[in-house]
Image: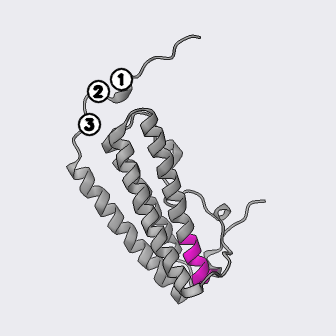
Amino acid sequence: MTKKLDLTRLDLMDALDLAILVEQEAMERYEELVAQMREHRTEEAASFFHFMAKAEAKHGADLLTQRAKLFGKAPRRVDRSLLWEVEAPGYETVHPFMTLREALNVALDAEVKAYAYFAEALKLPLTPPVKKLFEELLQEEIVHQEMVKKELAKAPPEADTTPEDFADEPMAQ
């Protein structure tokens, strides 16, 4: 049975827990992508994904600190089964031998996706504290998008060849 998260029933503690879980999921996905890119010796993409993993971890830690100040060690009532890829890059968006520019675009798409999630949530009848938190999270996504766009502007243009052009063909065993 699939559980569904009713955002209109969240209190501030649950909303903070949701936000923390969103950041954790994104951080873990970026860490997976770092390992994948390093396996394929695509270090520029790996380095950028590592940067994103650290950024997501920091934002999650900030939210966790906020939660602890407000609610101490109260048990969490929201769990990861209630969300999927709110901010985490989709598996289908990555491939071996990604360029830095491709990695930046993956991150930008993830930030846009998170923005859309919170923008849709803000259309719901939320309690004032939850609405305020989601508005803050929405603004954070805008800041993150701008940061990625600045990096995209500095990134070198794509080459006529891709790293996949140099990948070895599978060999018969």
Prevailing secondary structure of the magenta residues: helix
- Few, some or many residues within 10 Å of mark 3 (<14, 14–19, 20+): few
Mark 1 or 3 closer to N-term?
A: 3
| Residue at screen point 50% across, 58% down | 26
What type is the residue that disc 1 sits on?
A: Asp
- Helix, strand or loop status at disc 2: loop
In the visual, does 18 lie left or right of 46? right
What type is the residue that disc 2 sits on?
A: Thr
Give residue 7's position: percent from left, percent from top: 61, 75
For residue 165, the mark is: 1
In the visual, does 116 lie left or right of 157? right
Let me know if residue 97 is in the magenta part: no
Residue with the most extreme front position = 73
Asked if the residue under mark 2 is in contact with the one under mark 1, i.e. CB atoms within 8 Å, the reply is yes
**Disc 3 target residue:** 158
For residue 161, the mark is: 2
CA gap, disc 1 to disc 3? 13 Å
**The N terminus is located in which quarter?**
bottom right
| Residue at screen point 21% across, 42% down | 156
**Which region is colored magenta?**
10-19
Residue 15 visible to an observer of this rendering? yes
